[in-house]
Image (spheres, rainbow, N blue to C red):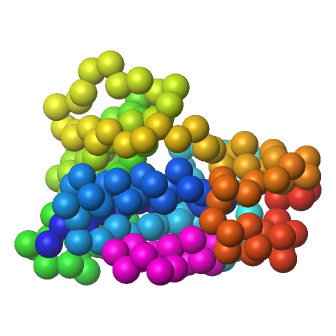
Amino acid sequence: MRIGILGGTFNPVHLGHLILAEEAYRILNLEKVIFVPCYLPPHKRVRGLISPQHRLVMVKEAIKGNRHFTVSDIEIREGGVSYTFKTLQKFKKMFSHSVDIFLIVGADALKELPRWRNFPEILSLAKIAIATRPDFPITKKPHWAEVIKIPLIGISSSEIRRRIKRGITVKYLIPPAVEKYIEKNRLYKDE
């Protein structure tokens, strides 16, 4: 069995995340992709980070209808700063030893990835799949990673939050169900 783990703040989840997950599913021949919203990101401080519960619900709404996508609240239940190596340890225990885990990350994380806490353990627990992203060229492929070329979609959660705060439409940047959830709960208005 081959599964992909796609972690992040998902603040909010957008079509770029979904395209990344779908392409990783196809290119890596995965049986499923598990979205893992973090509780608190260790590598960056995100302005306007909304509650983990809101972010979890938005991911659930975004992936409805895609039978090979699922979401895990493993990091949210843990609380505190979310470290990838701890999450991978838990997934490794949940699945049999015959499962290949692929940690899916964007090229924007490539430079910092070797500095992640317990990086050698991350490499022992999962295969790393680095997805291409606009404005983050991969000049040299690390020996410990596989590069997957996906359509270069220049959508970012920070830009979506800025647009919402300014009252600019986010239609076609996020799934309609996520857009409705944001409007209903008046999220990102006061960032």
| Residue drawn at (40%, 58%) of the image | 21
Image coords of residue 154 (percent x, y): 58, 38
Q: Is residue 49 above or below residue 143?
A: below
Q: Does 86 sit left or right of 129 as displayed?
A: right
* Outermost front residue: 172
Residue at screen point 91% across, 52% down = 167
Furthest-left residue in this view: 98
Side of 55 where 64 appears, left or right: left
Determine whether 152 is above or below 27 in the image: above
> Where residue 92 sits: x, y (%)?
23, 71
Position of 45 compared to 83: left or right?
right
Q: Residue at x 39, y 36 (%)?
A: 132
When asked about the image quadrant of residue 175, the answer is bottom right
Pick the front one: 13 or 173: 173
Residue 67 lies in the magenta stretch: yes
Give the magenta range: 57-73
Residue occupying image coordinates x 22% and y 40%:
146
Q: Is residue 44 magenta?
A: no
Q: Residue furthest top?
A: 139
Left or right: where 172 falls relative to 34: right
Q: Indicate whether 64 appears above or below 35.
A: below
Q: Position of residue 127 (x, y in %)?
A: 21, 51
Question: Does residue 80 appear in the picture of this structure?
Answer: no
In front here: 68 or 95?
Answer: 68
Residue 67 shows in the view? yes
Q: How many marks?
A: 0
Instruction: Specify the quadrant that holds the N terminus.
Output: bottom left
Return the x and y of residue 93 as percentages of the image width and height.
23, 77
